[in-house]
Image (tube, rainbow, N blue to C red):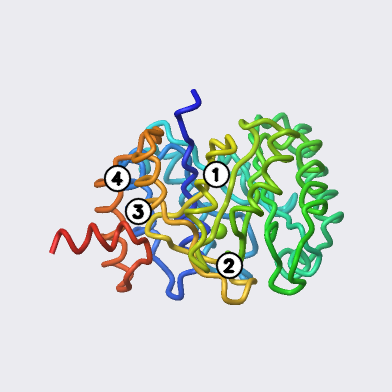
Amino acid sequence: MADRVRVFEVGPRDGLQNEPRPISLEDKLWFVRALVRAGVKELELGAFVRADRVPKMADTPQIYRAITSGALDLGGARAWALVPNRRGLRSALRVGARNIAVFTAASEKFTRRNIGMTISESLREFSRLLADARARGAEIHVRGYVSTAFGCPFEGKVSVGRVLKVVEKLAALGVEQVSIGDTIGVGTPNQVDAIFKPALELLGPERVAGHFHDTRGTALANALRALELGVRTLDSSAGGLGGCPFAPGATGNLATEDLVYLLDGLGLRSGIDLTALCRASLELSRRMERPLTSRYLQAFSASCD
Ligand code: MG
């Protein structure tokens, strides 16, 4: 199993949410189908958040209704959605969402700006949310994000101790996997060592994921270091879509194409067909009328001309 890597595709949510222009529901559904056809098995599709705060995620219930009605066939891939609170959970359960992601951060100022709570408040809310789901008899899978683990746009350096404390608390709540994120793309491989070694010791490789951003060109180096340490789930977005609206200057998740090219080269299996993925991203780029940042995709595109 050690040569298998779970690529957690966040493009349809983390990516598209942060695109300057809105994307139509039709284009989103097309994009998700294309990703699934390329072999993506884990997909972050949307967020059950306030439409006035994050208008681009307002169509998440419609995406789930398309799944339930059979209009969107995921072919066995798992759909995930962000849920910030109990209200979001109720909306999610109503449309059949069963894989949910909760999110907090390792720095207070970012958490406050991002979800309007302190870190402790957010953890308390998740605890209530999970109890709520259990009380309703809902079989849900829960993933937890820890943002700003490598640095905060408002506070600067974030200590490893603070990151691990949040990781530990999420795990204690029963979160199946904790995704540790470099939200603003400042991390370097020595930080990956410092954070992921103890996180892996604490939770084991099944429960740890890495979420890297390429803002300063270090995402792939960090991903490689995480793989060497034994991490087997990495978040990425097709074409390198996305950033974070609450983190000024944060652009670009690790691109799935770049990650899959690395994995293929290392003999690690993701199940993703790189050519099919590139075709999907190029078509999305055409529909969005903007180039995407993935380096592999750019090389692929040039070789197609
Ligand atoms: Mg991201």
Lower position in the chain sequence, tag 4 or tag 3: 3
Which of the two discs, 4 and 2, labels the residue nearer the N terminus?
A: 2
Name the mark nearer the viewer: 4 or 3. Answer: 4
Please state which of residues 303 and 141 is positioned toward the viewer in this rendering.
Answer: 303
State the CA–CA distance, disc 1 to disc 4: 22 Å
**Residue type for callout 4:** Leu
Give the alpha-carbon distance from disc 2 to disc 3, as whole Å: 20 Å
Is residue 90 visible in the rendered structure shown here?
Answer: no
Q: Secondary structure at mark 4?
A: helix
Q: Nearer the viewer, residue 265 or 274?
A: 265
Query: Residue at coordinates 51% horizontally, 69% vertically from top-left?
Result: 251
- Residue type at tag 1: Trp
Q: Residue at x 58, y 34 (%)?
A: 230
Q: Determine which residue is flagged by label 1.
A: 80
Label placed on residue 261: none
Q: Is mark 2 within 8 Å of ligand 1?
A: yes
Q: CA distance from mark 4 to mark 3?
A: 15 Å
Q: Which mark is residue 31?
A: 3
Looking at the image, is mark 2 or mark 1 earlier in the sequence? 1
Image marks 1 and 4: residues in contact by CB distance under 8 Å: no
